Image (cartoon, rainbow, N blue to C red):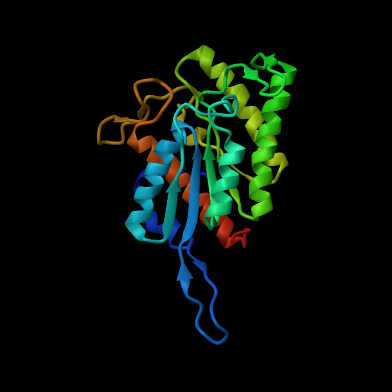
Amino acid sequence: MIVSRRRLLALPAAVALASLAVPAFAAEGDPPPRSLLRVAVIGDSLAQGLGSSLSVRAKQTGALTVLPAGAHSTGFTRYHDLNWKTKLEGMVADRRLDAVVLWMGLNDFRAIVDPETRRRHDFGSPDWVRVYAERIDELIDVVKAARIPLYWVALPVLRDSTNNRGMQAINQLQQERVVARSEHWIPIAPLVEGPDGGYMAYLPDTGRGPRRLRADDGAHFAEIGYRLVADQVLERMAANQAQGGEGR
């Protein structure tokens, strides 16, 4: 369920977080103790901002452990800098994770160079789409092997129209692969776009004056924007838990 911007700004973090604690192992006959969900947040600089907001929400209630692992200037087209499949495999092996949240793509509207053949695949070409989709699927394979849910956040609309066309093409490809693999796709358009679906720098005035939603670069978010997205992620996680979704 997607809720309004106004409701999310007023939503107590405890509403979503209270239902996220999961039972740990207990001896027979003992009341089941409670443990904290351990959630890794991975991706590019968007994930860095989201990880910070989720960490604040977690500290407010003590019902969640957030492991921020976003890395600036990374992406599915930049595996020469950081291979996210290898990174996530290491995180899953080293830590007990209950869920992974991913937000990535700001750096991906560029060519992909095949590390083995050194062939260059131009952005949007059939080979580019193939390699990009394969990298998405490989990352999803990691969480499926670990039997933990993946919450994949949709990419935002950008202020620059040329960059935005590329971003929305990437967003569509990500959504297609995530939905096809039965993982959790989290749309954010109703939260951060204007009535016409366009870029929105400030939240509508609700009597407190305009509140900055997006950063000056026209791509990232201000604090309120990351908080809106964080609450949306928490709401989706809580709904999945309530429905008996796969966990640890």
* Foreground residue among 115 and 46: 115
Quadrant of residue 165 in the image? top right
Which x, y percent locates residue 191?
Answer: 46, 36
Above or below: residue 83 compared with residue 168: below
Residue at x-position 41% and y-position 41%: 228
Q: Is 30 positioned to the left or the right of 218 in the image? A: right
Could you tell me which residue is drawn at 52 percent across and 55 percent down? Answer: 95
Locate residue 184, reporting x and y percent: 61, 45
Residue farthest toward the left in the current orientation of the protein: 208
- Where, by quadrant of the figure, is residue 18 drawn? bottom left
Which quadrant is home to the C terminus? bottom right
Q: Could you say which is closer to the camera, residue 162 or residue 144?
A: 144
Q: Can residue 236 be seen in this snapshot?
A: yes
Instruction: Give the answer, above or below, for where 121 lies relative to 30.
Output: above
From this viewpoint, is residue 1 visible?
no
For the point 39% across and 30% down, the residue is 221
Q: Nearer the viewer, residue 18 or 30?
A: 30
Seen in the image, is 95 located left or right of residue 135? left
Residue 176, image x, y percentages? 69, 34
Q: Residue furthest front?
A: 116
18 displayed left or right of 115: left
Looking at the rendered structure, the number of numbered marks drawn on it comes to: 0
Q: Is residue 64 above or below residue 228?
A: below
Residue 59 drawn at (x, y percent): 34, 55
User: Where is 175 relative to 108, above or below?
Assistant: below
Side (left or right) of 118 relative to 165: right
Identify the residue at image location x=64%, y=28%.
172
